[in-house]
Amino acid sequence: MGSRKRIMAEKMKEARKSSYHAILRNCPIAPRKMRLVADMIRGSNVGSALDQLRFNPKHSAQPIEKLLRSALANWQNKNEGARMEDANLYVREIQVDGARMLKRLRPAPQGRGHRIRKRYSHITLVVASRENAVVEETADLTKAND
């Protein structure tokens, strides 16, 4: 492995240590409907994101809330003894991708069949601390100025 590649790999490892993620696969809700809720909480603090998800009437808010709680539990496991309120956590990244698709046929007039596509989605949620984000941004700015 070349030196540049190794240095980039080490930087990526360090960045992953300060962020915590959770993944939900094959959720039986269409990605288009799921993205409406995901866009709402992207970049917001964890407390306000949980409040928004809890009181949102959309059906897709419930699995995203559960996934956010899972990411917070992952953070809690790695940072034993630390309080979430002091860490200033926020939703750094939430990504909704298409998953498998169930294909069915519905009977239609005159012997035809109309296709029904039941869409599923994969969701990836990353939680990070605001202090780490500020340090990473300043490091990028100093690197750009050099």
Image: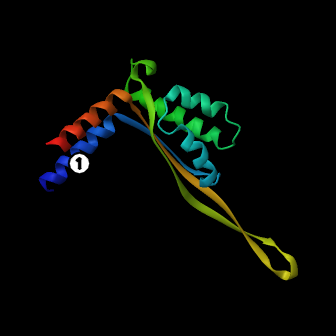
- Percent position of residue 94, x then y: 48, 44
Image: 118 above or below 17: below
User: Which of these two is toward me, 8 or 66?
Assistant: 8
Viewed as shown, does residue 64 lie left or right of 107?
left
- Asked if 55 appears above or below 146 in the picture, the reply is above
Q: Nearer the viewer, residue 43 or 128?
A: 43
* Number of residue marks: 1
Residue drawn 65% across the image and 44% down it? 60
Instruction: Name the quarter where the C terminus is drawn.
Output: top left
Q: Circle 1: is it few (<14), some (14-19), or many (20+) Cα within 10 Å?
A: few
Residue, disc 1: 9
The amino acid beneath tag 1 is Ala
The residue at 13%/56% (across/down) is 2
Q: Residue furthest right?
A: 110
The location of residue 96, given as percent across then percent down, is: 53, 50
**Residue 115 picture location, percent across and down:** 72, 71
Q: Is residue 22 left or right of residue 135?
A: right
For mark 1, give the secondary structure. helix
The residue lying at 87 percent from left, 82 percent from top is 110
Q: Closer to the camera, 100 or 128?
A: 128
Left or right of 110, for residue 104: left
Residue 80, given in percent of the width and then of the height, sits at 39, 21
Q: Residue extending furthest bottom? A: 110
